[in-house]
Image (cartoon, helix red, strand yellow):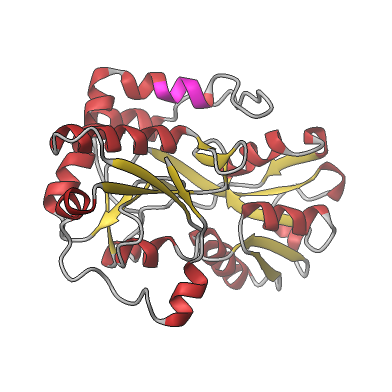
């Protein structure tokens, strides 16, 4: 596997990465170039994260790798290279649209707004926005954050959700944004924010990788339930059919449940944390429905 540094900001600045591909035909692109580029996240435990220099692992990484294997079979070319590209919440959609990456499987919410720019595969997880804070903070729910600083991650739906909740409830919070999940958690750890608003499953993953996990707690009501799904370019019916065939096939065969148990009910690297998170009702129902229905 060939790893490439996430140099998207510099490339965007030079104007080299502007606009979507003229024609969304991912399988033809892969056949012509001899490679498929998969995106990964650096700190979305247990979906897609690094356990060493340029070594991403996770539930969504395994799904993406299964898609890559299916592409090789479909094109009858086992020599196709698998390149890996780090992405952030902010650049993942532009890098997909302009062809830098071919598939993004991570912790991306499938919603109607993003559906105008990209296509989503079958939903593979459901989560809701909650709060990560220090146990000593006294924070138990959103009302406790009135007139205080609250962190979230730039470019996420969670940042939009917490802003709306703040406005609707006149809490006068000050929203501060980290460039990624680790950065947002550091804002709380360093005292620059009282809590971190993010998908609860990612918060539990961050606690497991923290230096002192016992210092942290996830609190608050889930503001809304949102689906995660892999992203691909719009209007690419052939590639969408292949990706959905892989995910749907895993769901139908029982392989998806085994994969879920591996990452949510078993010890995972690097610290052998076990989230002990049984599959929720929404996801279990989607093993049968195999829906790509977005959040509003």
Dominant SS of magenta comes to helix
Horizontal side of residue 138 vs 176, given as left or right:
right
Residue at the location (78% across, 61% down)? 193
Residue at the location (16% across, 56% down)? 236
* Place of residue 146 in the rendered image (x, y in percent of width and height, measured from the top left): 75, 66
Residue 118 found in image quarter: bottom left
Residue 17 found in image quarter: bottom left
Residue at the location (21% across, 35% down)? 72
Horizontal side of residue 217 vs 106, given as left or right:
right
* Place of residue 97 in the rendered image (x, y in percent of width and height, measured from the top left): 30, 65
Q: Which residue occupies the extreme right position in the image?
A: 136
Residue at the location (23% across, 68% down)? 21
Residue 175 found in image quarter: bottom right
Q: Is residue 51 magenta?
A: no
Residue 106, placed above or below residue 9: above
* Place of residue 185 in the rendered image (x, y in percent of width and height, measured from the top left): 71, 52
* Place of residue 24 in the rendered image (x, y in percent of width and height, measured from the top left): 17, 61
């Amino acid at each position: 596997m060939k790893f490439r540094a996430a140099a998207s900001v510099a490339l965007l600045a030079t104007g080299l990465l502007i606009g979507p591909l003229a024609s969304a035909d991912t399988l033809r692109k892969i056949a012509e170039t001899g490679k498929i580029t998969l995106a990964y996240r650096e700190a979305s435990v247990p979906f897609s994260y690094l356990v060493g220099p340029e070594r991403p692992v996770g539930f969504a990484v395994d799904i993406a790798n299964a898609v890559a294997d299916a592409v090789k079979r479909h094109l009858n070319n086992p020599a196709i290279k698998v390149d890996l590209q780090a992405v952030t919440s902010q650049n993942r959609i532009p890098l997909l649209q302009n062809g830098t990456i071919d598939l993004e499987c991570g912790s991306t919410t499938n919603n109607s707004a993003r559906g105008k720019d990209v296509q989503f595969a079958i939903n593979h997880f459901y989560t809701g926005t909650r709060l990560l804070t220090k146990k000593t903070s006294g924070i138990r729910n959103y009302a406790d954050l009135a007139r205080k600083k609250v962190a979230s991650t730039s470019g996420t739906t969670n940042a939009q959700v917490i802003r709306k909740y703040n406005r609707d409830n006149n809490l006068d919070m000050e929203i501060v944004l980290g460039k990624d999940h680790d950065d947002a958690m550091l804002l709380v750890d360093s005292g620059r924010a009282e809590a971190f608003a993010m998908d609860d499953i990612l918060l539990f993953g961050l606690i497991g990788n923290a230096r002192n996990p016992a210092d942290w707690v996830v609190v608050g009501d889930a503001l809304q339930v949102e689906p995660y799904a892999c992203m691909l370019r719009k209007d690419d019916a052939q590639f969408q059919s292949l990706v959905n065939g892989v995910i749907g096939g895993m769901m139908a065969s029982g392989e998806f449940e085994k994969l879920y148990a591996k990452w949510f009910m078993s010890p995972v690297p690097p610290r052998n944390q076990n989230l002990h998170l049984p599959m929720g009702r929404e996801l279990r129902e989607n093993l049968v429905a195999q829906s790509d229905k977005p959040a509003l």
